[in-house]
Image (tube, rainbow, N blue to C red):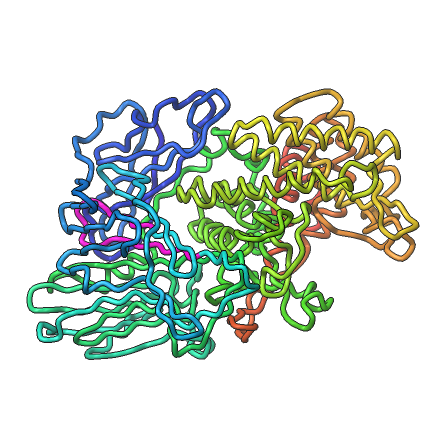
Amino acid sequence: MSRLYFEKYANFERKNEPVRVSIPFPKGKLMDTEKLQVKDTVTQTKALSYWEDGSVKWAKVDFLADLPANASKEYEYGFDFEGVESKPINITKAESIIEIDNGAIKINLNNTPGTKPFHSIGFLTQDQINGPYIIDEDDNQRIAIISGPWEIEEHGPVLTKLCVKGSHFLDFMLTVTIYANTPWFEISYRIINRHNAEYVTIKKIAFDIHLKSAQATDLSLATSNYLTNIQKGESHFIIDDEYLLLDPNEHTPEVFYGTFFADWVGEQEGICATHYQAYQNFPKGLKIEKNLLSIEILPEEYGSLKYYRGMAKSHTFFLHLHNKTDDINKRSLMMQQPDRPNLPAEVYGESGVFTGIFAKNKWQPFHSYIMNLADNRGKAYGILHWGDTPDGGYSQQGRGGGMSVWTNNEYDFPYQAIQLYAQTGERRVLDYALTAAAHLVDIDICHSSDDPLRQGAQIEHSRDHVTGDVNISHQWVEGLFEYYHQTGDKFAYNTAIGVGENISRYLDLPRYHQKGNVNARETGWALRALMSLYQETGDKKWLEKADFIISHFEDWQETYGGFFAPYTDHTLVRVPFMIGVAVASLMRYYRVKPEPKIKNMIVSAMDDLCENAILENGMFYYKELPSLNRPGANPIVLEALACAYELTGDEKYLRAGIPTFIANISKKNSGPGKKSRVTDGVLHDGAGPKGFAQGYYPLTFYYYHISGTNIINELSRYF
C-alpha cells in the first residue's frame, strides 16, 4: 500500500475529477493490473511495460478523485482494496457509427473509411462540424477523411480513448478521450508529412463548428496568464510572436501559461472550445461569431508554415458542452493544468526502474546545482519549436549557416528530466520531461524518407530541426519509452522501435565492422539504445545487435590497448568523454548480462584513462592531441568512473573524478533572460537544454556513489 499526494491547488471543490498517474512496480510484485485499486474510488488501470518475468513494470492508473478547495489530499493504492462498483462508459456500434454515452454527453463517430471523423457531438450534427481541415498553398481546403475504423485503445469506467488514422493530403491520427460523467472531452490531432517533396506549405489548420445564429444569446472569448480577460460579443483573436514578446508571464510555462477559450451560448445549451498550451505553441487563434466557433490551430492571418517531410506535430483542444450555470473559465483553466498526484520517491527507488539516482544523503550544493541546471535554461515558443531550444555553441560555430541550430533533445533531455522528477516529485520537472518528449517524438524524428538510413532516425542538432545528418551517436530511445510510460501514447513507443531499427541498419554498414574506424561514442550510444529496447520489449534481436557491439569493443580494445578513435587522417586518440559513453553503456549491458569480460573491459578502459588522460591540475584532457590537450570538464567521464568503482570498490576511481565534479557544480547559471525572435519562434534566452541533458545522470550517478564515502565531507570545504 502506498500513497498518492495531491498538493493544494484549485480554489473550488472537484467531485469525481478524472486524474492520471503512472506507477512503477518492482519485478514480481504485480502480475495483474485488475488487482490494483485506488482506495474508495473508481479505478481504471492499464499495464504499459513488463519485467522479463511477465510482471508489470509500469501501470497507468486513471481514477475519479474528490478534491477539496484550497487544500491538499492523499489517496491510497494497493492490492487489498475492494473495487468501487462501476460500469464502463457506454459504447456501442450501430451500423457504421460508434456511439459513446458517458452519462453527460453523447458523441457519435463515423466508422466507415472515406467519411469525416465526427457524426455528431451532443447537439451538433454532422453538417455543423467541419474538420479538422487544412488549407494548402493553392487555397484548397483539405478535410480530414478517415482511412479505417476507429480503434478503441482504452475502455473502462473512468475514460474511453479511441484513435483513427486518415489523410487530408497530409496523414493524420485523431484521438478522442472521453471521461465519465463529464460534459467535456479531449481531441488530440497529430499530422504527419509523408509527401515526397522536401516540404509542403500550409496556410491554415482549423476545426470549425457552425451554429444557428438565431439561437445565440452570449458569445465570449478569453485570454489569461493571471486573471482571465473575457471579451463579450463576436471576436477573433490570434496569439502570435508580437503578443508573446510583449506579454509578461511568471509561470513555469511547461506547467501553465494561461487559458485561451471561446464560448458560444444558445437558448438551451452552449459549447466552449479551449486550446491546450496555445501560447507555447503559437500561432493559435479563436473566432467566435453568432454562427461560428472556429478553433484555429494555424491561423491563416499569421502566414504560411513550412512543414518538412518526415515531421509530425500534435495539437490538443477540448470541447465542453454545457449549460448556462457551468463555470467555463475555471474548467478551461483546469484543462491547462489538471490535477495530478505525486508518488513518494521511495516508490520509484524500490521499483528498480531507475538505477543509481536515489542517494541516501541530500547534499544541498549538489541538489541546488542540478535543479538550477534544469530550471534556468532557455525556452523556445512556437508551433515547431516548443519543447526544444537552440544551442548557442553550435549556432556560433556556424553549423546552421548563420541560422540557429536546434538542440533536438541531444543527450535525451526527457529521460534525464523524468529521473529528476522521480527523485524530487516536483510537478514542473515532470512537465519539462513531457513537453520535451512530445516535441522529440513529433519534430526531431524523421517519420518518412526514401532513404532507409534516415527513415525512423532522430536527426542530430541542426537548422530547422530536420536538416541535419543522422548518426547513431545522436539517437536515444529511453526518453521516448518513459513518455509512453507516463502517457500511454503508443505512437511514442512505436517511434522508439523505429529509432532502434534505424540504428540496426547503420550497424550493418561495413564501417561499423572495422576496428578503430569509428569513435567509442558512436557504438556506445547505440549500445545504450539497444539495451533499452531489449529491456522494454524482450525481443532478442536487440540483444543480438548489442552482442555484436560487445564483440567489436573486445576486438578494438585488444588490438589497440584501449578505445582509441580516429580524429584526423593521421591520428588515433583517446577522447575521455567518448570513452566514458562506451564504458557507461557497457555497464548497462553488464547489468543485464553480468559477464566477467564486460567487467574487465570497463575497468581496463578506466585504468587506461586514469593513467594516461589526466593533466597536472587533475582534470581529464579534452582530446589527446597537442592542439586539443586542454582541460575538459565533460561530466560523462564521471559516470564511467563511478561504474568502475561500483565493480571494484576502489575509491581511486571516484577520487580521479573530484576535480571534474567540482568544476561542474561550481558553474553558475543565471537563468532565462530577455525574449527575442528566433526564425519563426520566440526564444526566452538562456543556456540550451544540452547542459542538463548531458550532465544530470553522470553527475547524479557519481554523487550517488560518493555520498556513501568520506569524499562528500572533503568536498564541503569547497562550497
Q: Is residue 319 above or below residue 216?
A: above
Q: Residue at x 21, y 33 (%)?
A: 40
Q: Is residue 312 above or below residue 100?
A: below
- If the image is split into quadrants, where does the N terminus sit? top left
Q: Residue at x 46, y 26 (%)?
A: 26
Q: Quadrant of residue 373?
A: bottom right
Number of residue marks: 0
Q: Residue at x 38, y 42 (%)?
A: 342
Q: Residue furthest left?
A: 267
Is residue 186 found inside the magenta-colored segment of the image?
Answer: yes
Of 458 and 535, the residue lying toward us: 458
Q: Residue at x 63, y 68 (%)?
A: 404
Instruction: Pinpoint residue 219: horizontal percent, then vertical percent.
Output: 18, 74
**Which secondary structure dominates the residues rendered in magenta?**
strand
Of 704 and 381, the residue lying toward us: 381
Residue 347 appears in view = yes
Instruction: Pinpoint residue 438: horizontal percent, then vertical percent.
Output: 47, 53
Is 113 on the left or on the right of 681, as rendered? left
Q: Is residue 287 above or below residue 313?
A: below
Instruction: Pinpoint residue 190: horizontal percent, then vertical percent.
Output: 40, 55
Magenta-tinted stretch: 175-191
Of 630 and 344, the residue lying toward us: 630
Residue 579 appears in view = no
Is 713 on the left or on the right of 119, as rendered? right
Is residue 328 found inside the magenta-colored segment of the image?
Answer: no
Instruction: Pinpoint residue 521: horizontal percent, then vertical percent.
Output: 73, 44
